[in-house]
Image: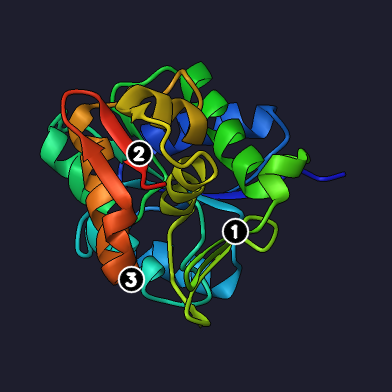
């Protein structure tokens, strides 16, 4: 069975070649783009399974590319891994706010990049098979269906990113259980993901906003983390 198709968008030729070489060696089909415009055009002409997106691009930057992909129904759930050379937490936070699934700071280890790609694609590939992971959760008009990766509020679909959905499902399936920020990240991304308190808080804030009045079910436990109201 052929492996996934990955689009890499970066204006540095050496980075493109490095990423392509390491991913192709793992059996992935790799497409390249040097600008944000080329990246968007490539996605629209041939939808990949994952995008690796540099933030610092000429013309349309990576954040705008991410924004446009998330605002298009055809690509709204397309997994995106951000690359940033700035080492600035603000850029990472902005990307996560826009719905990126992961981020890697330059310079990076090719082995780490490949591991992150495998993790994101594995998450995309389907939910766990356990009964708990597949059980539909219903709370006074809020329906969380992990099998369909769908959230409904009074019958109306709520558009969540993969990460937002996983956070909501992780909290809601254990109401009253307090999760630290690191436990949330472990459940959503795996324990090798470098996280800051701020990045988790950003995801929670975005999730609450999308849930509207139901956002109150996600409670902050000061000094510890978050829980779903029981």
| Colour pattern | rainbow
Q: Residue furthest right?
A: 1
Tell me, yes or no, if residue 187 can be seen here. yes
Circle 1 — which element? Answer: loop
Q: Report how far apart the C-alphas of labels 3 and 1 lie in the structure.
A: 15 Å
Residue at screen point 61% across, 42% down: 123
Q: Which residue is mark 2?
A: 227
Residue at screen point 41% across, 30% down: 185
Q: Closer to the camera, 209 or 173?
A: 173
Q: Residue furthest front?
A: 230
Q: Report how far apart the C-alphas of labels 1 and 2 lie in the structure.
A: 35 Å
Circle 2 — which element? Answer: strand
Q: Residues within 10 Å of mark 2 (few under 14, many from 20)?
A: many
Q: Is residue 219 left or right of residue 103?
A: left
As drawn, the label of residue 48 is 1
Marks 1 and 2, the one that precedes in the sequence: 1
Q: Residues within 10 Å of mark 3 (few under 14, many from 20)?
A: some
As drawn, the label of residue 68 is 3
Residue at screen point 48% across, 36% down: 188
| Above or below 212: residue 161 | above
Circle 3 — which element? Answer: helix
| Above or below 186: residue 5 | below
Name the mark nearer the viewer: 1 or 2: 2
Q: Report how far apart the C-alphas of labels 3 and 2 lie in the structure.
A: 32 Å
Residue 149 at what x, y percent from top left? 60, 60
Residue 139 at what x, y percent from top left? 50, 63
Residue 167 at what x, y percent from top left? 43, 44
As drawn, the label of residue 151 is none
Tell me, yes or no, if residue 126 can be seen here. no
Name the mark nearer the viewer: 3 or 2: 2
Marks 3 and 1, the one that precedes in the sequence: 1
Residue 61 at what x, y percent from top left? 22, 58
């Amino acid at each position: 069975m052929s492996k996934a198709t990955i689009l890499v968008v970066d204006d540095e030729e050496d980075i493109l070649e490095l990423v392509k070489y390491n991913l192709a060696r793992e059996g992935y089909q790799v497409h390249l783009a040097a600008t944000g415009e080329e990246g968007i055009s490539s996605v629209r002409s041939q939808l990949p399974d994952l995008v690796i997106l540099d933030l610092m691009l000429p013309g349309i930057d990576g954040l705008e590319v991410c924004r446009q992909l998330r605002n298009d129904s055809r690509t709204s759930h397309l997994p995106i891994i951000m690359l940033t050379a700035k080492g600035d937490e603000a850029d990472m936070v902005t990307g996560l706010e826009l719905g990126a699934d992961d981020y890697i700071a330059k310079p990076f280890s090719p082995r780490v990049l490949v591991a992150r790609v495998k993790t994101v694609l594995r998450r995309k590939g389907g939910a766990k098979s356990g009964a708990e992971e597949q059980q539909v959760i219903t709370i006074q008009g809020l329906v969380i269906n992990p099998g369909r990766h769908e959230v409904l509020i009074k019958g109306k679909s709520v558009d969540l990113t993969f990460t937002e959905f996983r956070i909501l499902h992780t909290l809601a399936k254990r109401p009253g259980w307090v999760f630290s920020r690191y436990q949330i990240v472990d459940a959503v991304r795996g324990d090798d993901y470098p996280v800051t308190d701020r990045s988790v808080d950003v995801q929670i804030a975005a999730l609450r906003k999308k849930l509207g009045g139901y956002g109150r079910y996600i409670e902050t436990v000061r000094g510890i983390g978050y829980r779903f109201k029981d």
